Image (spheres, helix red, strand yellow):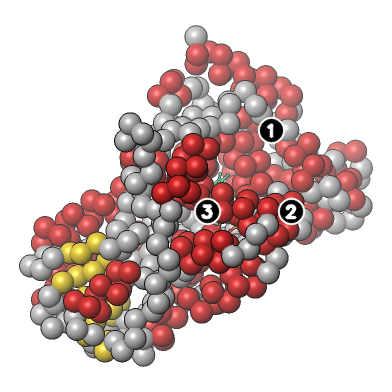
Amino acid sequence: VTAVMWFRRDLRLGDNPALLDAVAAGGGRVLGVFVLDPLLWDRSGDPRRNRLAASLRSLSESIGGRLVVRRGDPATVVPAIAAEVGAASVHVSADYAPYGQQRDQEVEASLKCPLVRTGSPYAVAPGRVLNQQRRSYQVFTPYFKAWLAHGWRQPAEAPADVTWVKASSEELPLGADDAGEGAALKHWKAYLEDVAAYDDERDRPDLDSTSRMSIPLKYGEIHPRTMLADLARKRSAGAEAYRREVAWREFCADLLARHPQAAWKPLRPEFDKMQYDEPGELFDAWRAGRTGFPFVDAGMRQLAETGFMHNRVRMVVASFLVKDLHVHWRFGARWFMRSLRDGDLASNALNWQWVAGCGADAAPYFRIFNPVGQGLKFDPDGDYVRRWVPELRHLDGKAAHEPWRYDASGYPDPIVDHAEARREALRRYDAMRS
Ligand code: FAD
């Protein structure tokens, strides 16, 4: 017999229960396939495409070059390949995102053998964390407590003795990044040595002290269970704080699985009535990192140049778009999904909703970030701004956050008056509520 392992967001061999099931079902004979689904591939931006390609290359190398890559609609491609090798079953780790769930149902309907779902990209699968009335949570802190109490399995070993079955494959797309399971584990182990500082330093983009694990997590080069097991061995406030962030990722996935419409629609229905402006020149300035607010521009340029942005800065640029420029968060969320290497529908949409005040457990709408104050607080010496905004490199220390007080030709003037924009945001909020 042969079993098919259909890889999706789990591009690794270690701690992969779906793969272990495939090996058991195939008596050691497994065909590993990845389907390049045009619907997802064509919508991703280059940063995500390149990163995925690099990860696939690495996975293929680790199975002797035998990863089979086929392009097309999974509902056609997966049954075809299963028939080609006479597969007894097709194995996946479950996908809880709206498109993924629908796609898997379609594949299941056209397969002649079972589609077996084992595990998920989360320590606790969406839908499992329930309160005493067996309802899911809308608020993070009680979710987090229940998530901890629920617990998770210990990481599983990579399978031994697999015969990877050959089949024709498309050329793998090129990917330049350093990616894959080995690189992810190495990066994580090195980061773990410094995790104690996470609690104090994670809000400081100038120190660049967060883990950047969102990218390997996105592609499943590592499972969060593996990380949580390592964190449990570290007794520090930093390790505790880190675990809480991992739980945020799971909370986002849980919310999206229960409210698929939350991908692009506000979770709080009253926000359907919120008045927003059409994205025009101001939106273009935001995307280009030319708003005249140094902390915002530094973030948007970091995003454009590297496909990454620090979490604190994501919050500030998102707030700026929604509350200073009065543009719907959906446009920002879409730009992020195009630009981020870690672009993940659940984490992205729910965090945008959090910032925009319309999410489940959102920041209150009337709490409006001051983009200059945030910069002065979290980038106190201006290093982050100078790193990403070359026009401001001649300004020392904090001065980089307030270029209008100095000579900064070549750098744009602020595109809005923050105090005025803030008043307008509050006016619209009141109008929505009345
Ligand atoms: P670390 O600080 O080292 O955190 C460790 C891990 O915890 C992260 O890798 C991530 O998996 C998880 N995590 C941390 N913060 C959050 C959070 N607020 N929500 C969910 N998970 C979190 N994260 C994504 O992975 N993909 C996205 O598309 C995404 N879009 C975002 C959009 C906005 C507007 C905001 C405010 C946040 C977004 N985040 C997103 C969450 C967060 O910014 C990133 O996960 C984090 O910056 C990644 O960097 P890191 O791995 O160094 O984080």
Residue 298 x/y as whole percent: 71, 51
**Residue beneath disc 3:** 246
Residue 355 x/y as whole percent: 57, 36
Horizontal arrangement in the rendering, residue 350 relative to residue 63 (left or right) = right
Closest to the observer, 415 or 247: 247
Residue located 68% across and 53% down the image: 237
**Residue beneath disc 1:** 369
Disc 3, SS: helix
**Kind of residue at disc 1:** Phe
User: Is residue 63 in sight in this rendering?
Assistant: yes
Residue 429 x/y as whole percent: 56, 18
Residue located 60% across and 73% down the image: 189
**Kind of residue at disc 2:** Glu
The disc, 2 or 3, on the residue closer to the chain's N-terminal end is: 2
**Kind of residue at disc 3:** Val
Horizontal arrangement in the rendering, residue 173 relative to residue 283 (left or right) = left
